[in-house]
Amino acid sequence: MEDPLILTGARVFDGSRFVTGDVALQGGRFVAPGAGRRLDLGGGVLAPGLIDLQVNGGGGIMLDGDATVERIATICAAHARLGTTGLLPTLITDSRAATQTALAAGIAAVTRVPGFLGLHLEGPHIDPRRPGCHPPGHIRPIDEADMETLLEARTGLPALMLTLAPAAATPEQIGRLAAAGIFVSLGHAEASMAEAAAAVAAGARGVTHLFNAMSQLGAREPGMVGAALSLPVAAGLIADGVHVAPEVMRLALRLAGERIYLVSDAMAVAGTDLAEFPLAGRRILRRDGALRLENGTLAGADLSLPQAVRTLIGLGVAPEVALAMASSRPAALIGHRAEIAPGLPADLVHFDDDWRLTRVWQRGQEKSSAA
């Protein structure tokens, strides 16, 4: 076996805090530092590979009804170059056939695609009053056939996340999904505080892209936003400065603290120079750091997780908090570990002193960064 690679000269964030010392890689895993080939990084920060629970696409491809192992691999590889070494490819609202195709491709990808941690189905069981860019013709309540499909798929996937609206599923259905180990997240919902609380009591553990496509905080009705900020749920945040204003992000962090994690909500353009792409027969335009339908509706984000980390640090968030929001926090939600510790897979990112991504390792192999 090749001698260990010893990375020196950088501050080390181990997944929860900054620690002193070097980082050693051998055989695709972290090992205890000792003798070996040494690489001086000349400053910056080493951190666990980043984890994204909401990735719609990348490398010019969306996860859709044409899903295959090869297309999932393209998405995962594009994001590995951007610093996300583990992710949940995400299927937005689509037909039953498309959902079944994506689930089958995901199950086949489990042992074949580096960085593939499972799937996220964002819909079709959402609220038609809050569709965002989701095709309205496929939005529908969950039924028993859907339940059987989801419960069976969970047995073949390391993680399955499902975004649904309280109006589209009963508490009993949410409870069955949660009991099977499915991470139920509330989103695209015109829900009251009481409706959201009932879903959480039944087993929902998250809220998808906080503030976006949901009922807002009001003086007499807290809505979905109020529920997310006050109930014991994790909440994904798109920190691109477009989906949520900086002042609102700061407020959310003060109120929800350790329950907030970062997502990219990335689309097909991630890792490419594409100026537009099709989505359900509609054009998505890439302009001024945002992705929008031709009518101006936001359609995912033109964002990578390292960019989101840099945004938060620029807002005054402590680096160890911003890094945890993009690594160990989302990982824990799906039973994964994003940490620098002997024996774990050597997934690793390096930032320079200005918090720009410079290098990425996945299973100990360095990737050419697309940052």
Image: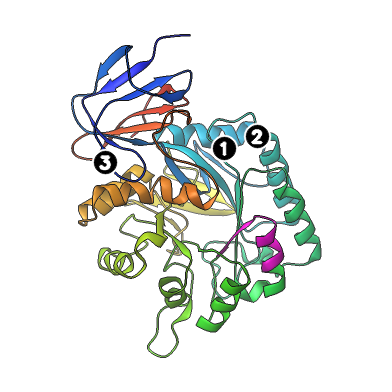
User: Real-space Cα distance between discs 1 and 2?
Assistant: 7 Å
Instruction: Determine whether 177 is above or below 111 in the image.
Output: below
1 or 2: tag closer to the N-terminus: 2
Numbered range of the magenta stretch: 174-185
Colouring used for the render: rainbow
User: Real-space Cα distance between discs 3 and 2?
Assistant: 34 Å
- The percent position of residue 119, horizontal first and vertical second, equals 61, 47
Q: What kind of residue is marked 3? A: Phe
* Residue at numbered disc 1: 116
What kind of element bears circle 2?
Answer: helix
Is 59 magenta? The answer is no
Q: Residue at x 51, y 65 (%)?
A: 132
Near mark 2 (Cα within 10 A), the count class, few <14, some 14-19 or many ≥20, is many
Circle nearer the viewer, 3 or 1: 3
Q: Residue at x 41, y 38 (%)?
A: 339
**What label does residue 318 carry, if any?**
none
Task: Give whichever of 49, 121 is nearer the camera.
Answer: 49
- Give the quadrant of residue 51: top left
Instruction: Determine whether 61 is above or below 27 in the image.
Output: below
Q: What kind of residue is marked 1? A: Phe
Q: What kind of residue is marked 2? A: Ala
**What label does residue 18 carry, if any?**
3
Labels 1 and 2 touching (C-beta < 8 A):
yes
- The percent position of residue 148, horizontal first and vertical second, equals 79, 57
Task: Give whichever of 284, 153 is nearer the camera.
Answer: 153
* Residue at numbered disc 2: 109
Q: Residue at x 63, y 66 (%)?
A: 136
Near mark 3 (Cα within 10 A), the count class, few <14, some 14-19 or many ≥20, is some
3 or 2: tag closer to the N-terminus: 3
